Image (cartoon, rainbow, N blue to C red):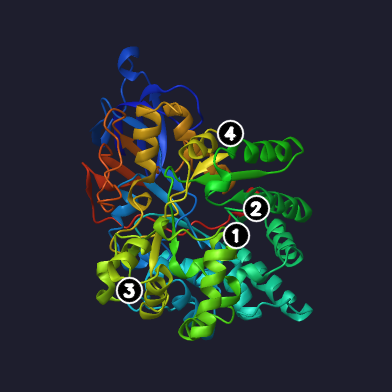
Amino acid sequence: MEDLVIRDADVVDGSGAPSYRADVVVDGGRIVSIVKEAAAAGCQRPRAVRELDAEGLVLSPGFIDMHAHSDLALLRDPDHSAKAAQGVTLEVLGQDGLSYAPVDDRTLAEVRRAITGWNGSGDDIDFDWRSVGEYLDRLDRGIAVNAAYLIPQGTVRALAVGWEDRAATPAELDHMRRLVAEGMAQGAVGLSSGLTYTPGMYAPDAELTELCRVVAEYGGYYCPHHRSYGAGALEAYAEMVDLAREADCSLHLAHATMNFGVNKGRAPELLALLDEALAAGADITLDTYPYTPGSTTLAAMLPSWANEGGPAAALARLTDDGTSERIRHHLEAVGSDGCHGVPIEWDTIEISGVTDPALTDFVGRTVQESADARGESPWTTARHLLVTDRLGTTILQHVGHEENVRTIMRHRVHTGGSDGILQGTKPHPRAYGTFPHYLGHYVRELGVLTLEECVAHLTSRPAARLRLPDRGLVREGYRADVVLFDPLTVAAGSTFENPRRLPTGIPHVLINGRFVIENGRRTDELAGRAIRRAPQCF
């Protein structure tokens, strides 16, 4: 007999089609049979070693997190309930142009320091890889959920050029092309950039275009965190559309928000730009998280010139009084490129995490609130945090607009991505709640999307972008990456006050046919594996 039959489920299959009632049979890690309306038809019902009664539950494909920062968390935390309990069965890592492969000893140390706020220091990790393929092999030893990887362009530039703000030489550009080609050949699904983060932001469009040409040759996609989400956001989106068209490369826009006061109500302008490009034949998708605040590191707010040369150089500038004053002026008066060209508002910058335990009292308060309590200027407080915490401080930035969030999530090329940073005492609740928040708040409570539409956004659309031939739909022969949830109770447990609460209404999650969540509890299964680009699909 087969391994498992899930009886009387309301199947929302990921295609956007209406739901149907069925028994779903799983064997050998795949869906082997779907028997619709089995009880009503009076036919012989499928049998299996194990039966699961799914009366009242929706069965859908597993959710795909198109923008995840679990690069070290998957290795550090075998439980990984932050994502598994949401029904996430696949995460896309290597985001925002900075991650841990490909590297050499020098760049590994530099990158570890630069993104400590995203992923922790890594002191508890054995970094026994250097190439993309070796990192994917490390994931294959057993992880909680499946994971795909984007080659991080900033890391590639650090390896070939360094952290300086200058053009690459022809030899350095060739080196970067080779690194991208090697990473794609080893299984990466595309290339990411963080164009408000150093050193990736130092790359001109011509350089990015050349790297995207390599990605396109392997059937991958380009995923930029583009040059501004504030002042000049629409121009930054248009820049990426033009770049991808020039390179003939598929484009996936990361956390495609329209933030800050200058962009209030302007989401329709972004969608009009994308619709025009799509009508002209461009291959474009995007992801968003269903919240208004953003999250990053406090150091990311600095002007790019202050970060040139890497983390050690940035700290040296911050400790120099004269240079520190220049940084303050750019942040508060000019609007630094790190803060998307908008003068920083310290009352929107909430400290979410620190690496130095002595700074814990700052967590949960805005920089302005802490400065007022300390009787000093906000920049003095921010500078103290940056230097004392060695650039490891994470923040929430309360600059979003709900109407923009809702408008963008309705678009036909939209997918879901948590952008979840799992570090810090008080992380953004999107890390633990993005997918149930879509289903509970935006589907059931607000009706912004129908259930069938929303599931398609979170499953088949991202699977199509990743060119996965056997994931993203409930179909016979497909991998048994499935979620069972109660549409009447599913909700994010996480809040801004209690961001690590697990969701409700998701009793069962299977990855490759194995229960990782069963009866609402995490099992011991490490059912995830690295998902490599499949050449036969292209």
- First of labels 4, 3 by sequence position: 3
Evaluate if marks 1 and 2 touch, with contact meaning CB atoms under 8 Å apart.
yes
Evaluate if marks 2 and 3 touch, with contact meaning CB atoms under 8 Å apart.
no
Q: Nearer the viewer, mark 1 or mark 3?
A: 1
Describe the element under mark 1 as helix, strand or loop.
loop
User: Between residues 59 and 338, which one lies in front from this camera angle?
Assistant: 338
Residue at mark 3: 355
Describe the element under mark 4 as helix, strand or loop.
loop
Residue 29 at x, y = what percent?
Answer: 38, 46
What type is the residue that disc 1 sits on?
A: Gly
Circle 2 residues within 10 Å: few <14, some 14–19, many ≥20: some
Q: Quadrant of the N terminus?
A: top left
Rendered position, 334 above or below 496 = below
Query: As drawn, is 88 to the left or to the right of 287?
Result: left
What type is the residue that disc 4 sits on?
A: Arg
Query: As drawn, is 340 to the left or to the right of 386?
Result: right
User: Between residues 349 and 196, which one lies in front from this camera angle?
Assistant: 349
Residue 232: assigned label: 2
Residue 341: assigned label: 1
Q: Label 1 vs label 2: CA separation?
A: 8 Å
Evaluate if marks 4 and 3 touch, with contact meaning CB atoms under 8 Å apart.
no
User: Between residues 69 and 368, which one lies in front from this camera angle?
Assistant: 368
- First of labels 2, 3 by sequence position: 2
- First of labels 4, 2 by sequence position: 2
Residue 412: assigned label: 4
- First of labels 1, 2 by sequence position: 2
Q: Label 4 vs label 2: CA separation?
A: 24 Å
Q: Label 4 vs label 3: CA separation?
A: 40 Å
Q: Nearer the viewer, mark 4 or mark 3?
A: 3
Query: Quick one: which residue is furthest to the front in this view?
Result: 375
User: Between residues 230 and 195, which one lies in front from this camera angle?
Assistant: 230
